[in-house]
Every structure is written in C-alpha cells, then in structure tokens.
Image: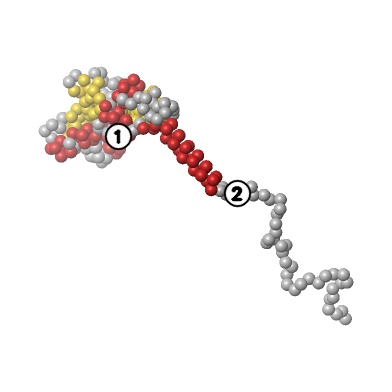
C-alpha cells in the first residue's frame, strides 16, 4: 500500500503557502533616466523675468505698436444698401488699435443710423481690418405716405421710405384712426397683426394679395387680385383661416367675397 507522497531526490521543498509572485516592489530599472530637474532659484528668476517681458511685449504690440491698427473697414451682406453706405455710417475710428474698437457700440451705432439693418456682426480681422456683416430688413408690407412708400418688416417695424414700390409687396392701409383698438393696442401692434396675417397666407394666395386693410384689431380685410375681398377678422387662428380660405378659393372660383373670420363657419358671396 502506497504511503504518503514524498519529494523526489534533488527537489527543493517550497515553503508553506502559495507560490509568491515575482518580486515587483523595490525592483529597479537602471536604464530609465529622468533628466528633468526642478529649476533652482536662479532659474525661477529667469523664467519670471522672461514671462513679464513677454507679457509687456504683447501689451505693447496690441495697444502701442503700429502693427495691429485699423486700416480698413469691410461691409458684407448688403442688398438694398451699399457697402459704402454701411462703412460710412459705421464711422469706425481709423488708425486706432484693433483691440480697442468697441464692437458692441459700433453695432448699436449702425442700427441707429441705418434702420434698414436688422442685425450686424462686427468682427476683428487681424491684423488691420474691421468686418461688418449685416442682415437687412425685408419689406412685408408697404404703407403709402406722401407719394412714397414706408416699408414695414416682419416685426411690424417701419424701417425705410422708398420712392417706388418694390415689386410683389402688398400695401397696408391703416384705417383705425377712430377705432378703440388704436387706443387699446397701439399702432405698432396693429401693424404687427397685419404683417402676421399676410405671412399666414400660403404662397399660392400670397402672390394674389394686393392690400391688407386694418380697421381694428378684430377687423382685418384682405384685397386679392380680381377684385376679391376676404373678411379675415383678427389675427387669431391664422393657420386655420388660411387653410379654409385656400379651400374656398378653389371651390368657389367665381365668388368675390369670402369670410373666414370664423373659420368653423366660413361664407362666400358674389359672382
């Protein structure tokens, strides 16, 4: 009967417990070198002096040198306006440090002097240029005034007066001088309501729009080509009214008067 297993001759008996992992802690790698050494006091002084000199040079270059100064102003994005008009209205201080130009103040000045400008981005283009990227207001309606036309944009803002009516822009007739709506809402809000009504129309109807007439906030009337009129009412439920009007125009092609002021109960008349 076999007895307990004994170690073979020549084998070393391992110590009790599991075999130990290779000795990792304290292992040295003599081939690795770390050349970085913290600078001494003298090195710190040199670095500090260099940083101060570099900062002073940067300030001098930005504010005192002739390298980074305003030499030209460029305007882009114009349509009715010209780049020359925009540059002239900006009155950008020339030959001043580019960094010192107050871009926000310049933008406010441009919008105040040229109301046709809706937004303007003022950018520094190093080393010598100020860029003026403008977005102009576009007319949604025209208000006849003294033989000319005041342009009204999508926000109801009167922003310019022109001698000739731009093609395809409907007229706006404000007939609310004696209306309580004028006192309650104000002329600006009534203009915005008229613009919103015009913008609610689908393109197929908008191309036939000739005039928007505002008697009060609740009494807006549209005049279409072919001597057709539309009682719109207020600007409320604009999308629904536009949908109903489109269907009526197709179903009653000979009608001349359409009423969509209550879109759930529209009416047509005339032939």
Write the residue at 20% across / 29% down: 213
49 or 82, which lies in front? 49
Question: Can you give x and y, in whole percent of width and height, for residue 80 in the image?
Answer: 32, 22
Task: Please say if 20 is above or below 264.
Answer: below
Farthest residue toward the front?
42
Write the residue at 19% across / 32% down: 214
Write the residue at 39% across / 23% down: 71
Q: How many marks?
A: 2
Label 2: which residue?
Answer: 37
| Residue 101: mark in rendering | none
Question: Can you give x and y, in whole percent of width and height, for residue 242 in the image?
Answer: 29, 35
Q: Whole-Å distance between the Cαs marked 2 and 1? A: 73 Å
67 or 211, which lies in front? 67
**SS under mark 1:** helix
| Residue 60 seen by the camera | yes
Name the image quarter holding the N terminus. Answer: bottom right
Colouring scheme applied when the structure was drawn: secondary structure
Circle 2 Cα neighbour tier, 10 Å, few/some/many (<14 / 14–19 / ≥20)? few
Label 1: which residue?
Answer: 200
Disc nearest the viewer among 2 and 1: 2
Farthest residue toward the bottom?
1
């Amino acid at each position: 009967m076999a007895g307990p297993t004994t170690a073979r001759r020549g084998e070393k008996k391992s110590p009790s417990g599991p075999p130990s992992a290779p000795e990792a802690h304290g292992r040295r790698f003599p081939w690795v070198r770390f050349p970085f050494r913290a600078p001494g006091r003298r090195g710190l002084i040199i670095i500090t002096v260099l940083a101060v000199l570099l900062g002073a040079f940067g300030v001098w270059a930005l504010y005192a040198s002739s390298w980074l100064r305003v030499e030209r102003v460029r305007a882009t994005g114009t349509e009715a306006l010209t780049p020359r008009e925009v540059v002239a209205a900006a009155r950008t201080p020339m030959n001043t440090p580019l960094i010192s130009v107050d871009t926000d103040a310049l933008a406010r000045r441009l919008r105040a002097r040229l109301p046709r400008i809706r937004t303007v981005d003022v950018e520094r283009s190093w080393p010598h240029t100020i860029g003026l990227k403008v977005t102009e207001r576009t007319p949604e309606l025209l208000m006849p005034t003294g033989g000319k036309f005041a342009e009204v944009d999508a926000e109801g803002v009167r922003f310019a007066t022109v001698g000739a009516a731009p093609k395809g822009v409907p007229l706006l007739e404000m007939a609310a001088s004696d209306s309580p709506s004028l006192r309650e809402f104000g002329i600006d809000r009534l203009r915005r309501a008229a613009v919103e009504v015009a913008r609610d129309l689908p393109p197929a109807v908008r191309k036939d729009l000739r005039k928007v007439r505002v008697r009060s906030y609740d009494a807006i009337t549209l005049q279409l080509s072919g001597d057709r009129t539309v009682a719109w009412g207020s600007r409320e439920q604009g999308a629904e009214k536009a949908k109903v009007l489109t269907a009526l125009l197709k179903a009653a092609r000979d009608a001349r008067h359409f009423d969509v002021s209550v879109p759930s109960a529209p009416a047509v008349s005339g032939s």
